Image (spheres, rainbow, N blue to C red):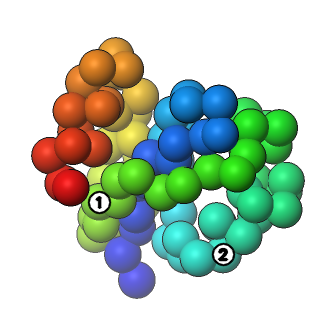
Amino acid sequence: MPWIVYILECADGSLYTGITNDLERRMKAHTNGKGAKYTKHRGPCTVRYTEALDSKGAALQREAAIKSLDRAAKVALIASTS
């Protein structure tokens, strides 16, 4: 099963980056306030970007790389897949 790096846009306009191997389950957790602390009070959140990777290690590295980007670069990444 592939690992997915994703970027969510929260209701307050902020961006959250995470990884999962089951995006549907993870989105339900975010929606129900049982996902990350960051998204708990910032919902609803919308998936804006996904990227599938072969391993958890690769997904963690990609997540770290995306998190190190500034907001403008994240927005550009999201726009590049739209």
Q: Residues within 10 Å of mark 2 (few under 14, many from 20)?
A: few
- Nearer to the camera, 53 or 17: 17
Q: Residue furthest left?
A: 80
Identity, as a three-letter code, of the amino acid under mark 2: Arg
Q: Which residue is identified by label 2?
A: 25
Q: Which residue is identified by label 1?
A: 51
- In three-dimensional space, the C-alpha distance between marks 1 and 2, rounded to whole angstroms, equals 16 Å
Task: Kindly identify the residue that appears in the image at 27 percent across and 44 percent down.
Answer: 78
Task: Kindly identify the residue that appears in the image at 70 percent across and 51 percent down.
Answer: 44
Q: Which mark is residue 7?
A: none
Q: Give the image location of residue 68, x and y in percent.
A: 36, 21
Q: Is residue 13 above or below residue 80?
A: above
> What secondary structure is found at the residue carrying circle 1?
strand
- Nearer to the camera, 37 or 61: 37
Task: Kindly identify the residue that appears in the image at 44 percent across and 46 percent down.
Answer: 7
Q: Give the image location of residue 39, x and y in percent.
A: 72, 41
- Disc tally is 2
- Nearer to the camera, 27 or 57: 27
> What secondary structure is found at the residue carrying circle 2?
helix
Decide if residue 65 is in sight here. Answer: no
* Mark toward the start of the polypeptide (1 vs 2): 2
Task: Kindly identify the residue that appears in the image at 81 percent across and 43 percent down.
Answer: 40
The quadrant in which residue 71 appears is top left
